[in-house]
Image (cartoon, rainbow, N blue to C red):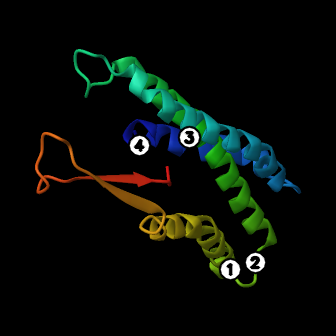
Amino acid sequence: MAVPLVPLQIVLPLLLSKYTMGARPMDIYIRAIPYRLAFNFIGAFFVLVTPYFLSPSSPHTLPNYYYIILLFTFCIHQVSLYAMFVASMAFFARVSDPGVGGTYMTLLNTLANLGGNWPNTVALWLVDSLTWKQCSVDEANSCSDVNLIAVSSIG
């Protein structure tokens, strides 16, 4: 899904930069937060209804309109994501000292990246401890053919 979005990812910062110039670049960031949060719920709902798109004749194939809906949803999510990204970069450029150059802006961007990425790392680290396993033996199978069922509590 990332390849069709490359033109959008190139054009969005150019379009959004005119709205982030000025005295209050973080206003766009604050306005984009509810939309980005709403698309989390839309994405979760989309995952929930995905099995209903599977056809009984070919259970491992999704129709083409499913991918179009997915791409459209992801495009709208990218708009809110890039609005927040461009607004934060404009804010960092505004508060950075010109005498130091790009060093302070790079530090602010590094801290923002660390602040935004550590939850992913923690969630992946917790997968083993938040996953439980249950063994079940079918009547038709012997005890040597034990099916392992792993149910993860992380989406």
Residue bearing the label numbered 2 = 98
- Label 3 packing within 10 angstroms: few (<14), some (14-19), many (20+): few
- Label 1 packing within 10 angstroms: few (<14), some (14-19), many (20+): few
Q: Secondary structure at mark 1?
A: loop
Please give left or right for residue 153 compared with residue 4 in the image. Answer: right
Residue bearing the label numbered 1 = 101
* Sequence-first tag of 3 and 2: 3
Residue bearing the label numbered 3 = 11
Q: CA distance from mark 4 to mark 2?
A: 35 Å
Q: CA distance from mark 3 to mark 2?
A: 27 Å
Image coordinates for residue 20, horizontal then vertical, percent: 77, 50
Tag 2 and tag 1, C-beta contact below 8 Å: yes
Towards the viewer: 148 or 93: 148
Q: Residue at x 27, y 25 (%)?
A: 61
Mark 1 or mark 3, whichever is nearer to me: 3
Image coordinates for residue 131, horizontal then vertical, percent: 43, 61
Please give left or right for residue 41 compared with residue 143 in the image. Answer: right
Q: Residue at x 43, y 28 (%)?
A: 50
* Sequence-first tag of 4 and 3: 4
Mark 4 or mark 3, whichever is nearer to me: 4
The answer, for residue 92, to whether it is visible in the render is yes
Amino acid type at image mark 3 = Val
For residue 128, above or below residue 71: below
Q: Residue at x 52, y 28 (%)?
A: 72
Amino acid type at image mark 2 = Pro
Residue bearing the label numbered 4 = 2
* Sequence-first tag of 4 and 2: 4
In the rendered image, the residue lying farthest to the front is 139
Q: CA distance from mark 4 to mark 3?
A: 15 Å
